Image (cartoon, helix red, strand yellow):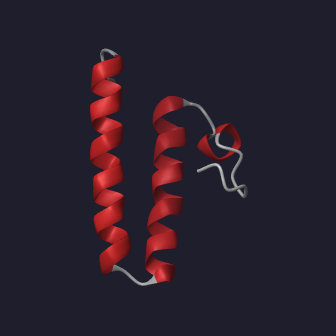
């Protein structure tokens, strides 16, 4: 899915954030972490940007 402008990107990010918040409340820690890993892989595949590197994974920034 290619997004056409910044508003589309922000809307998609907000939607993903809301879905992840719901999933976090409903899943075990292990299941939620697996979901986050899947999301990171999908974002990397879709954008060509290693989301983990861009976000400085392992720090408290994300």
Q: Is residue 19 visible?
A: yes
Q: Residue furthest front?
A: 60
Q: Is residue 1 visible?
A: no
Residue pushed farthest bottom? 28
- Residue drawn where x is 50% and y is 30% of the image: 47
**Horizontal placement of 37 versus 17: left or right?**
right
From the viewer's perspective, tell me whether residue 16 is left or right of residue 39. left
Give percent across and percent down for residue 40.
53, 51
Position of 12 relative to 25 (above/below): above
Residue in front for this viewpoint, 22 or 50: 22
Residue 48, relative to residue 50: is it above or below? above
Residue 39 or residue 9, whichever sits in front:
9
Quadrant of the snapshot with the N terminus = top left
What is the x, y in percent for residue 14?
A: 31, 42
Q: Name the image quarter holding residue 49.
A: top right
Q: Is residue 36 above or below residue 13?
A: below
Spot occupied by residue 21 in the image (x, y as percentages of width and height): 34, 63
């Amino acid at each position: 899915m290619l997004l056409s402008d910044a508003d589309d990107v922000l809307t998609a990010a907000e939607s993903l954030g809301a879905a992840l918040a719901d999933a976090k409340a409903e899943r075990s820690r292990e299941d939620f972490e697996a979901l986050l890993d899947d999301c990171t892989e999908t974002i990397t595949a879709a954008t060509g940007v290693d989301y983990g590197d861009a976000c400085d994974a392992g720090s408290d920034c994300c």
